[in-house]
Amino acid sequence: MTAGLAGRPESGGLPVPFACEDDDGALDHAAVVKRRAIRCALSRICGICGETLTRPIAFIGSSEEAEAGSFDFPPTHLECAREALDLFAPIGGRHLGHSEPPLTWALVTTGGFDLVRPTRRGDKVTFHPNSILDTELTD
Ligand SMILES: [Zn+2]
């Protein structure tokens, strides 16, 4: 069992993932905090609960992100990904680091990933799953 979203601080009555909380405590469902994304990658911790990742590693994002193999939201536990999609996908809105709600959410499981640093200073980092096991779509 992973902690999932239990115990996460709330904004707008909904728990905020680890990756959407700034180190000063600022909370924003619609944005991934860059330094947290980098910490998730380098320390191999989950972007939802903030605990150590286990395999398979999961990525959540839009179906377009899944097709491109490039995700904004950091890696998560599979259980945490499912919990987050169960909560956020049905209600729509700007969640899980997305400023626009995806029409179709994707959950990709993978054996590993690369952190892709921006070519331009100040741009966001992205994540590239490098050995995809499965892709699930949720409308
Ligand atoms: Zn987790």
Image (tube, rainbow, N blue to C red):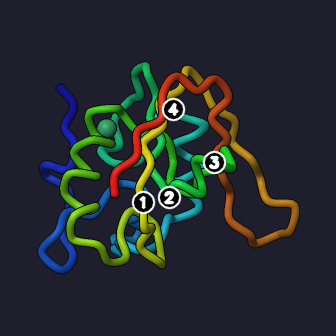
**Residue kind at label 2, given as amino acid type:** Ser
**Of callouts 2 and 4, which one flags the residue occurring earlier in the amino acid sequence?**
4
Residue under pointer 3: 67
Contact check, label 1 and label 3, Cβ < 8 Å: no
Circle 4 residue: 44
Task: Please give the name of the residue rendered at 60% of the width and 49% of the height, measured from the top-left corner.
Answer: 38
Can residue 23 be seen at all in this image of the molecule?
Answer: no
The amino acid marked with disc number 4 is Arg
Camera-side mark, 1 or 2: 1
Instruction: Give above or below for 59 relative to 102.
Output: above
Q: Nearer the viewer's eye, disc 2 or disc 4?
A: 2
Compute the Cα span from label 1 to label 2.
6 Å
Q: Quadrant of ligand 1?
A: top left
Residue at the (33%, 70%) spot, across then down: 25
Quick check: can you spot residue 81?
Answer: yes
Looking at the image, tell me whether mark 4 or mark 3 is earlier in sequence order: 4
